[in-house]
Amino acid sequence: MKQTFTIGIGGAAGQGVATPGDIFAKIFSRRGLHLNAYNAYQSIIRGGHTFLTIRTGPERVSNMGDRVDLLIPLNQDAMNRHLGLLTDGAACIYNADTITPGVPAKGALLCPLPVSKLADISRNKVAQNTLAVGAGLSMMGIGFQSLEEVLTEQFKKKGDAVVSENVGIARAGYDYATAHFEPFPWPLPMTNNRYAVLSGNIAMAMGGAAAGVKFYCAYPMSPSTGVLHWMAAHARKAGIMVRQVEDEIGVVNMAIGAAHAGVRSMCATSGGGFALMTEGLGLSAMMETPVVVIDCQRAGPSTGVPTKTEQGDLWQILGAAFGDYPRVIAAPLDIGDCFKIIPEIFNIADRFQCPGIVLCDLLLSEGRLSVDPKDLDFAPVVDRGELITSVPSTSGSSGDGVYKRYKITESGISPRAVPGVPGYAHTAASDEHDEDGVLISDEFTNPTKRRNMMEKRMRKVTGIEAAVPPPVLSGSRDADITLIGWGSTKGVIEEACEILTEQGIPANHLQIRWLVPLHGDAILNILKDTRHTIIVENNYSGQFARYLRSETSYVPNGYIRKYDGEPFMPHHIVEAVKEQLGGKSRLSVPAHEILV
Amino acid sequence: MATVLVDTKHVAMADLKGKVDPDWCPGCGDFGVLAAVQKALVDLQIPNHNVVTISGIGCSSNFPGYINTYGMHTLHGRALAIATGVKLANHELTVLVTGGDGDGFGIGGNHFVHSMRRNVDLLYIVMDNQIYGLTTGQTSPTSRMGMKTKSMPFGNIEAPVNPISLALAAGATFIARGFSGEQKQLTDLIKQGIQHKGFSFLDVFSPCVTYNHDNTYQWFRPRLKKLEDDPAHDPTDWMAAMRKSLLWGDEIPIGKFFERTDVPPLHGAEPVLNAGPLLHADTRIPPDVAHSFVEELM
């Protein structure tokens, strides 16, 4: 089993849970350690309860894991909720002045900090947080210098006095722990690597910048707003026009307008905003103007649980916009993939002049992951397809009288001229139209032309299928169990497979990244050699299982589903698999033990 | 001696004729608006490839198909949102938005208000016939109270929106009203609206001869008074424009209500566009900038 170390920090919103989290994340990533962070929080600005989990280790950390090694409760509530998570070898650092500990499990250590003796709490309201960070790092066997560096960076804008005050407090916590608390038996190692730490939202925004997005617009909606924040903050450096729009109907149409004028254009939202965008997706398909829309799923329906994760929008996405039209739908597999997938989907959307949809979720959007900077490629392949932005120098003709925007071709792709090019003037219409853009919805209605135009557009599906790779099985082909997932569950399913295999139940894994086109034949070809298949997904009704069945008639042996707003942990899947192998159930719905 | 290259191609009315003839009912007010737009583009000598005509859905929204410019015939109510995207992606284009009162003030009301406060540089022409025509005669946001339609057979009990007052309140920087039966004035207002740097709103009475038997050419003609004939009218005076906008009944003003030129258009307020239209911008992020984006995360 991979060696990892997990810190859990709990407290009320506004108590500063994020800052110690950021400090730990910086120190770990600079030591060349990987990390995965997930913040369970509520739709509240002050108060309530948030619980941040940071898991680190020398190898890639793909999910939040099953265990907390170090608990830092910032208030009594957090102590009461989470002490029970600690098992043998774990520790809890807390403010002994304000928090009464419960009874920990055997082998779990209580580490009380006499906060008012170690720091002047009248001057520094977050002294307990800083002391705890210092104490924790001492117990992990990490030298104090790395903390001093991070604190200096963090407070340098506030002046030397603030820097030295905070470094002093951290030092006091560090030294107190060195003198009084037993260190963890496994000191955190160090590697020569350096990692960037980013959220899925930042990754998708940067992926957009890398893909050459020049227009981004949005209406604020959790958990997608982080994309807007990064875009807005970096717009001028990246040369991107970023607008906040009055509603998501305006968002998608403004994005289509910019795309139609010839630039790469993107927008992001969550399920509710996406619902408002659906008519626009049909417009993108009908006018054959490519646009990329990101849906960061949260727990629905309706306003739902805005700060909780779910994979519940699949059928909304599949059914978005009326009529049949070509499109491409992708679900990123992890935060690094959030970056990579954007240039990829733009190339397909541009080549096939159709909408591209990225189906992300809160787990990735707001989670954080260490990524090798080499994997953030700002010079990816950019394929704009058959786009005419100026009079072709070779043609010598102005296009007048010959250019047909919707020319019927074998591939279904018609060269796309953007406004401003002399000789190529045409009208793009949401009504059905002929090759030259003239409406065939009114006096020129003609069933033959309608059929020809439908078939022209739908022929692009064949090209899209060839452009998108089929999924592949990971792990040994010879396995007792095959777990099937899609999108963000990749990391946790992967780890569940490792645990199962170690425990004598060989398991392998099929993760779906491209939802449309699905490559049903390739999936059936993989699944025909399996012994026991279980579809794992973060929703109530098994949306992917139903989709797979509708496309392939495939029915798995069992299902593992979770719809409580929190992501899967590896043991949820492991235990459910064992339950199903024991023949107790075909449907498992694991309970989430961390009450947040 | 330096050679000066001049685009000598003269823009003529024939160049602006669309691929098909309008299928509006004979006598429809929209014919007059189409002719006035074509005349204005000829007068201003704007080449057709630099013009994008964008509409929503409705009788008048068929407009882009009848004029030979770049065109977008989009979704009901969404033309202004789309036009904003077009203008921001390539601000060298002349953007015309055309549509009806239901499209603009009903389903598109939200975009109407916000596009005006943003001062997007485009001309928005509403062919206001106070009725839904393409859906065969229902009450529109500008239908008068008491008007009987298929959707309100016992008479409209809802007050109509006043587009001119609304535009003034929302911050449009050029606001005018025309009549499709007044070609000369209408053409002049269109030219002014195209040349104005900011959001130009032109509400045009464009009678529906099939479904609106209340607001006919005959009803309008004796009531319409040209603002330019009033020597006291000062189109830079916002309060006076608001008072004029409230006139309705025996006297209905047409002409330019208001114009201000001290507000930059949206594309002029964003430094990202200083280097020129986004369409021509390099899609690659410079390596040093990309490097700084990643360094922030380390």
Image (tube, coloured by chain):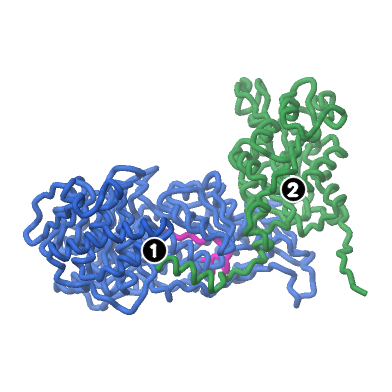
- Graded by Cα atoms within 10 Å as few (under 14), some (14 to 19) or many (20 or more), the crowding at tag 2 reads many
Q: Residue B226 falls in which quadrant of the image?
A: top right
Q: What element carries label 2?
A: loop
Left or right, B213 with respect to A66, comes to right
Instruction: Give x and y (percent) for residue A249.
Output: 54, 47
Q: The green chain is which one?
A: B
In the rendered structure, which amino acid carries the disc numbered 1? Answer: Glu
In the rendered structure, which amino acid carries the disc numbered 2? Answer: Lys
Chain letter of the residue carrying label 2? B
The residue under the point 33% across, 60% down is A164
In the image, which residues are magenta?
A346-359
Instruction: Give x and y (percent) for residue A217.
Output: 54, 53
Q: Is residue A554 visible?
A: no
Q: Residue A186 falls in which quadrant of the image?
A: bottom left
The residue under the point 35% across, 49% down is A307
Q: Mark 2 points at which residue?
A: B197
Marking on residue A153: 1
- Asked whether residue A167 is drawn in magenta, I would say no
Q: What element carries label 1?
A: helix
- Asked whether residue A358 is drawn in magenta, I would say yes
Marking on residue B244: none
The residue closer to the viewer here, A226 or A123, is: A123
Chain A is which colour? blue
Q: Residue A535 falls in which quadrant of the image?
A: bottom left
